[in-house]
Image: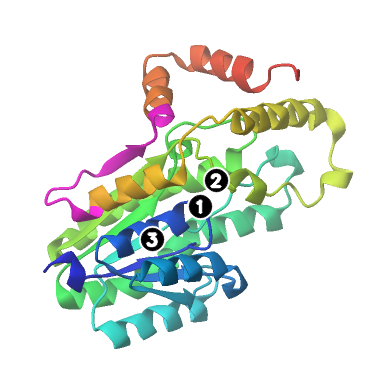
Amino acid sequence: MSQNNKVAVVTGSSTGIGFETALLLARSGFDTYATMRNLEKSGAIVEAARKGNLPIQVLQLDVIDDKSVKNAINRIANEKKRIDVVVNNAGYDLMGPVEDLSMDDIRAQFETNLFGVIRVMQAVLPVMRRQKSGTIVNVSSIGGKVAVPLNSVYNSTKFALEGLTEGMRYEVDQFGINLILVEPGVIRSNFLDNARLPTKTASADPAYASLMERATVTFKQMYEAGAGSPPEEVAKVILKAVTSDSPDVRYLAGSDAAMFLKKRKSSSDLEWEKFLKGTIFAQPT
């Protein structure tokens, strides 16, 4: 089957990686459903699709809502009779020390970054099993391989996503379904703007205030200095993965991701901790 006959679904398509991936898949011939929680944020992708005459349909899909996920996947399956590619991209960063995070904060992070992925896969797998083919790309993070200070819960969701994807590959291979992990490094998008802080910050223990201040300044300086890769680079990696005749299990996205992982592998645990402390907790300038 040519790409012009294939149907792709991308979650979290209003901005960043999801936005660029939906556009690139459509430009490459995929009949693409750009899904998002809030359709009020669909203006940019609708306009880009119109200008480029791209085969994109925008559809509401909230990964934390069972009914929303089922309705969206069922509608696509009924309209197109197949779903060939799913890119599980929806997610956000929860930043803060675990002691300061409420259980509601933590549950919400897992609901989107992990359970949301599971919801979408459970909804789409029956379609892919019937057609005896399909590719699911789970957008993880270099933070799913290496933990970053003050991102402990975010890292936990991505570490879990790595294990989930690895395990499921054995389950669905018999049906001709492939699961792939894409692990971006620092991405120059609105990811930092969308990051959430503890809801109880005002009453949080000030013992962590200095660490939070220093880390926040470091992350902002990195973004302002243009560190990392643009989301278009991740979209290119995803396209390569879903169009390969023999795709890898994992794809790093961004030169900093490869560098980060290489340094981690060449360092002892204590050496790595010292490096991160010196990098992220440097005194604000």
User: Label 3 amino acid?
Assistant: Leu
Mark 3 secondary-structure assignment: helix
Question: Is the residue 247 above or below the residue 59 in the image?
Answer: above
Residue type at numbered disc 2: Ser
Residue 219 drawn at (x, y percent): 64, 31
Q: CA distance from mark 2 to mark 3?
A: 16 Å
Magenta region: which residues?
Answer: 242-257
Cα–Cα span, label 1 and label 3 = 11 Å
231, 148: nearer the viewer? 231
Mark closest to the chain's N terminus, 1 or 2: 1
Residue contact at pointers 1 and 2, CB within 8 angstroms? yes
Q: Is residue 181 visible?
A: no
Q: Which mark is nearer the camera, 2 or 3?
A: 3
Number of the label disc, if any, that sits on residue 23: 3
* Image location of residue 2, percent across then percent down: 13, 67
Magenta stretch: includes residue 251: yes
